[in-house]
Image (cartoon, rainbow, N blue to C red):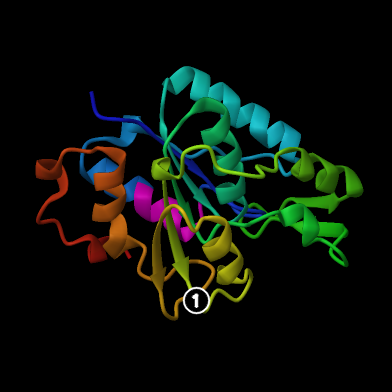
């Protein structure tokens, strides 16, 4: 059976984000929509992790795909459950980055407003992974012009992993649709299902 994929979006994002939408449409095109889960995560890390843990329990051993803060969550979960993870411009130790950002927040897609508190930051700190146990289980995609996160922090933290560093781009990761074959290969989706497809159609 084809491996399932669990896509983990970032802070103030949602299943309606560009990358999530592209992946959803591509998996549907392959006839594999049921093999993908893209949950709308709660803004509080403890509740978000509880949602993801429940999905991992349902899906068995999904391949994790995490973007931004979702990459941080994916790293924690990959270490906890021995899963493989593909990370896209992942956040590294985000609990150290929120000085000056506490207070009102708004989800870019749903319009939901919420308050970023010190409890959110403490909950993020609880998920920190000091050292990866098996870097071979990871693939990490970085773009150097990420305007939100310094890609060099991830480059150092994930240095023992398979790194794919691309000059330019942005935090949303330009050209994601064209890279879907790499994601599918990593996830173990059989090549005949996706070989020869023009994935730029999903832009």
Q: In which quarter of the view is residue 200 placed? A: bottom left
Instruction: Please determine whether, in this image, residue 36 is positioned above or below residue 181.
Output: above
Q: Is residue 19 magenta?
A: yes
Mark 1 = which residue? Answer: 144
* Depth check, front residue: 86 or 1: 86
At x 33%, y 31%, the residue is 35
Task: Please state, as top left, top right, bottom left or bottom right, where the C terminus lies in the image.
Answer: bottom left
Task: Decide if residue 197 is on the left or right side of residue 82.
Answer: left
Q: How many marks?
A: 1
Task: Please state, as top left, top right, bottom left or bottom right, where the N terminus lies in the image.
Answer: top left
Kindly state the secondary structure of the residue where label 1 is placed: loop
Instruction: Please determine whether, in this image, residue 73 is positioned above or below residue 69.
Output: above
Whole-percent x, y for residue 112 in the image: 73, 51
Whole-percent x, y for residue 124 in the image: 75, 44
Task: Decide if residue 151 is on the left or right side of residue 136.
Answer: right
The rendered magenta stretch, by its main secondary structure, is classed as: helix
Whole-percent x, y for residue 59 in the image: 43, 22
At x 57%, y 70%, the residue is 152
At x 69%, y 55%, the residue is 107
Mark 1 neighbour density, 10 Å: few (under 14) some (14–19) many (20 or more): some
Magenta residues, start to end: 16-23
* Depth check, front residue: 136 or 72: 136
Q: Does the magenta stretch include residue 18?
A: yes
Task: Decide if residue 12 is on the left or right side of residue 58.
Answer: right
At x 48%, y 40%, the residue is 38
Whole-percent x, y for residue 144 in the image: 49, 76
């Amino acid at each position: 059976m084809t491996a399932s994929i669990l896509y983990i979006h970032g802070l103030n994002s949602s299943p309606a984000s560009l990358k999530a939408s592209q992946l959803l449409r591509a998996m549907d095109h392959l006839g594999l929509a049921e093999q993908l889960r893209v949950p709308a995560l709660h803004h509080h890390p403890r509740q978000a992790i509880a949602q993801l843990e429940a999905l991992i329990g349902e899906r068995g051993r999904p391949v994790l795909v995490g973007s931004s803060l979702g990459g941080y969550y994916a790293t924690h979960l990959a270490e906890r459950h021995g899963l493989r993870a593909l990370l896209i411009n992942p956040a590294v130790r985000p609990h150290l980055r929120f000085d000056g950002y506490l207070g009102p927040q708004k989800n870019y897609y749903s319009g939901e407003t919420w308050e970023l508190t010190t409890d959110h930051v403490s909950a993020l700190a609880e998920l920190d992974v000091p050292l990866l146990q098996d870097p071979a289980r990871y693939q990490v995609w970085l773009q150097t012009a990420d305007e939100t996160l310094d890609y060099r922090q991830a480059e150092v933290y994930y240095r023992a992993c398979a790194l794919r560093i691309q000059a330019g781009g942005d935090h949303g990761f330009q050209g994601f649709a064209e890279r879907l074959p790499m994601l599918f290969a990593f996830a173990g989706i059989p090549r005949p299902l996706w070989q020869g497809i023009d994935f730029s159609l999903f832009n």
